[in-house]
């Protein structure tokens, strides 16, 4: 018989709501919520473990929901929930009637292993807005980067806003987080050239060679890169501006820089 949950007071529903709302709960329990068929599918593609599925039968069938489980030895528990409960838990107003609980991965830079001998990496320092993080992750996925490093993140990577704005690319990228010092140390140990997006002592981005192991580093739109990063770049780079302002959205700037590097590499992985 299927597991059915009809009460808002059910302990599982209360826990799901805490996972949705509270970063400290996600960190303590080492799990998080995924909403939507595409996002759950990408999490499975990214080798995330799905432990529970919650579906609303008035939106999605049991048969459809049960296909979004791990193809592994472990079993995924599947629960039927009412439309009222689903609407309370769902983060998006239009969605596919399904939620999942997944186990978080260890994203510490000190545990990260590069798989490429000639990596192209995006580094973003102290990002605050989940929307910007999501856009950066979508760009990184489109470019098929070897990694995305996030220095001094201001929010946990499994924040529902990041999952939503990245349209699941938080699962398809290889991500590592750490302090600015930790990430600089990692890049230097791996002999990776560090190109910082900054106006200080910079060269036009298209004049540089990105065909060797490369990290492109972007800061926040408000403050740019920290002095620590600026003191450790191989070269600072800038995008020539033809208008009245001297900055653009960080995800747009990162896309321009990343795809110049990909062009120089003939768009080969």
Image: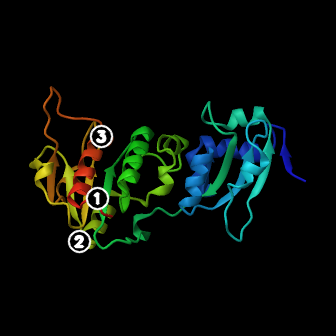
Secondary structure beneath dot 3 equals helix
Q: In the rendered view, does 98 fall on the left or right side of 244?
A: right
Q: CA distance from mark 2 to mark 3?
A: 27 Å
Q: Residue at x 77, y 57 (%)?
A: 77
Tell me the residue that label 1 is attached to: 267
Few, some or many C-alpha atoms within 10 Å of disc 3 (few <14, some 14-19, many ≥20)? some
Q: Is residue 104 visible?
A: no
Tell me the residue that label 2 is attached to: 191
Instruction: Point out the image quarter for the C terminus.
Output: bottom left
Q: In the rendered view, does 49 fall on the left or right side of 184?
A: right
Which image quadrant for residue 160?
top right
Few, some or many C-alpha atoms within 10 Å of disc 2 (few <14, some 14-19, many ≥20)? few
Tell me the residue that label 3 is attached to: 252
Q: CA distance from mark 2 to mark 1?
A: 22 Å
From the image, state whether disc 2 or disc 3 is nearer to you: 3
Secondary structure beneath dot 2 equals loop
Sequence-wise first label, 2 or 3: 2
Q: Residue at x 86, y 51 (%)?
A: 2
Q: In the rendered view, does 204 fall on the left or right side of 252?
A: left
């Amino acid at each position: 018989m299927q597991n059915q949950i009809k009460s808002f007071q059910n302990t599982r529903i209360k826990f799901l709501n805490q996972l949705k709302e509270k970063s400290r709960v996600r960190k303590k329990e080492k799990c998080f919520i995924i909403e939507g068929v595409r996002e759950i599918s990408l999490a499975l593609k990214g080798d995330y473990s799905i432990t529970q599925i919650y579906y609303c039968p008035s939106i999605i069938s049991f048969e459809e929901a049960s296909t979004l489980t791990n193809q592994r030895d472990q079993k995924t528990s599947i629960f039927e929930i009412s439309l009222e409960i689903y609407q309370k838990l769902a983060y998006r107003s239009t969605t596919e009637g399904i939620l999942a609980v997944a186990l978080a991965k260890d994203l510490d830079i000190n545990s990260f292993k590069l798989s490429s001998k000639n990596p192209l990496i995006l580094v973003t320092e102290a990002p605050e807005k989940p929307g910007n993080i999501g856009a950066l992750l979508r760009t990184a996925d489109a470019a098929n980067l070897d990694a995305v490093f996030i220095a001094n993140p201001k929010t946990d990577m499994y924040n529902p806003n990041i999952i939503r704005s990245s349209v699941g690319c938080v699962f398809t990228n290889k991500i590592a987080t750490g302090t600015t010092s930790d990430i600089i140390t990692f890049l230097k140990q791996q002999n990776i050239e560090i190109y910082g997006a900054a106006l200080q002592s910079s060269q036009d981005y298209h004049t540089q060679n990105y065909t060797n192991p490369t990290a492109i580093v972007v800061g926040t739109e408000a403050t740019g890169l920290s002095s620590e990063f600026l003191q450790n770049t191989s070269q600072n780079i800038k995008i020539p501006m033809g208008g009245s302002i001297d900055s653009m959205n960080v995800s747009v700037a990162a896309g321009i820089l990343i795809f110049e590097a990909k062009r120089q590499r003939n768009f080969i992985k």
